[in-house]
Image: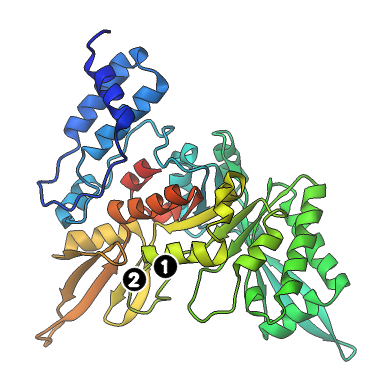
Amino acid sequence: MRGSPFILLALSLSQASEPKISTGKSKIAGSEPADALRLEIERSGANLTSEEKKEVLEQIDSEWDLIKEVITSTSILQNHMKFFKDTTIRRSRVAKVLGFVTPWSEYGYAMAEKFAKKFDILSPTWFELKLRRRDVNGKKRLALELRGDHLVSPEWKTAVESKGCSVIPRLLIDPEGSINKTWGQILRSRKAQEKVTEKLVQVSEPFEGLLLELYGAWELPRKSETVAFIKRVAASFKTRNKKVLLALPPYRKGSKGFTYEHFLKIIDDVDGIVLLTIGYSDSNLGAESPVNWVEQTLHEAVGMKSLESREIAEKVMVVVSFQGTHYRGQQGAELSGRRFISLLENHTCAIHWNPKAMEHVAVYKEKESGDSGGILNMLMYPTLASIQARLRVCRAAGVSVGVWGVGQGLHYFFDLL
């Protein structure tokens, strides 16, 4: 074994930095050399420690020369389906990884199962709890309607759990009509809170817990009532040995939503805080999730001093999206990986890097009959470089990661996790 190139490479990597986002215009390397090295490692891997083997594989991935600012449609089309077949190896180097799985895409279930060992938690977006105010004998009464029972897939749940992954579904609590009046009726009534909490506990029974999203609750003027409600639900779950994760809206300039003050009051009660750092432009033409906005959300909602505690930092999950937006003119629509690839195959796209947002955008013009200029199409879809930039923010802060749209991503994205 003395003098083995793999051991020498592993030792040299002990002082190496993580793969950088290249700004060069060097020729895109194919995956064949990397695949050959992987096969060699598999044949001689018994001579490497598991840590050395991981370091070698990380170095091989960085030598693909795909994580870069200057990319082409050709490089994406040639490489997006390639991934290391040992999907148990993790490269994200963050505490935990959560993945959201949307039930309207069977592809999402398949991708989540294929890459289940990349995740600690998978959160299918199965449930919605509608809150309604009904007139009963001249008085407003709270009515609850649970939606999504029919979406639950016990077979899929069993399959991913067998790979060591927890299944904690997301449940959206959605008030009907006036947000202030509906939430107000719940938050100012102990009986109403108990009714909602009882329903949440009932839904959580087959699972390890729930990931709750309280639509509009952080827009209320008296947020102390929202905090008290969360504490009540969390306490009830804990007595039943269930986990509560809380999804929170991102930072918006001028917004009076969730703040560091609220974070300090609930972080010890919940098992995780999920910062939904996606949809920056909200379907208006613009960046998807600028890196400086992600950092600002961490500062405003969590406070960097809090993250000095490793226990607290690992509870915080910053969401990175595997989904994009297709702007046709001024109209925006969700963009999945498969649709993105189809558009690259059928149009000549120029791909540009936005250094401020640290995102790529693919641009083409769609000509119509009698139209001399054509309709401008902009594909705001994640790339290896944009995902890596956000993972770096998470590593630097010591926080965990959430992936939105597991089924919307390209195969080679998962090699970064």
Kindly give the residue lying farthest to the bottom in the view shown. 138
Report which quarter residue 184 is drawn in.
Answer: bottom right
The quarter of the image holding the C terminus is top left
| Residue 279 percent location from the top left of the image | 43, 70
Judge whether residue 335 can be spotted in this image: no
Q: Measuring 15% from the left and 65% from the top, which residue is drawn there? A: 350
Q: Secondary structure at mark 2?
A: loop
| Residue 113 percent location from the top left of the image | 48, 41
Number of marks drawn: 2
Q: Which comes before the other along the chain, label 2 or label 1?
A: 2
Kindly give the residue lying farthest to the right in the view shown. 137
Up the image or down, 93 lies above or below 320; here it is above
Mark number displayed over residue 390: none
Report which quarter residue 213 is drawn in.
Answer: bottom right
Give the label, 2 or 1, closer to the camera: 1
Q: Secondary structure at mark 1?
A: helix
Kindly give the residue lying farthest to the top in the view shown. 1
334 or 185: nearer the eye?
185
The quarter of the image holding the N terminus is top left
Q: Are marks 2 and 1 in contact (CB under 8 Å)?
A: yes
Amino acid beneath label 2: Ala
Judge whether residue 279 can be spotted in this image: yes
Up the image or down, 98 lies above or below 349; here it is above
Neighbourhood count class around disc 1 (C-alpha, 10 Å): few under 14, some 14–19, many 20 upward = some
Residue that carries the numbered disc 2 in the rendered image = 287
Q: Measuring 64% from the left and 62% from the top, which residue is drawn there? A: 263
Amino acid beneath label 1: Trp
Q: Measuring 79% from the left and 83% from the top, which residue is drawn there? A: 134
Q: Measuring 41% from the left and 32% from the top, which residue is drawn there? A: 89
Up the image or down, 117 lies above or below 110; here it is above
Residue that carries the numbered disc 1 in the rendered image = 293
Report which quarter residue 224 is drawn in.
Answer: bottom right
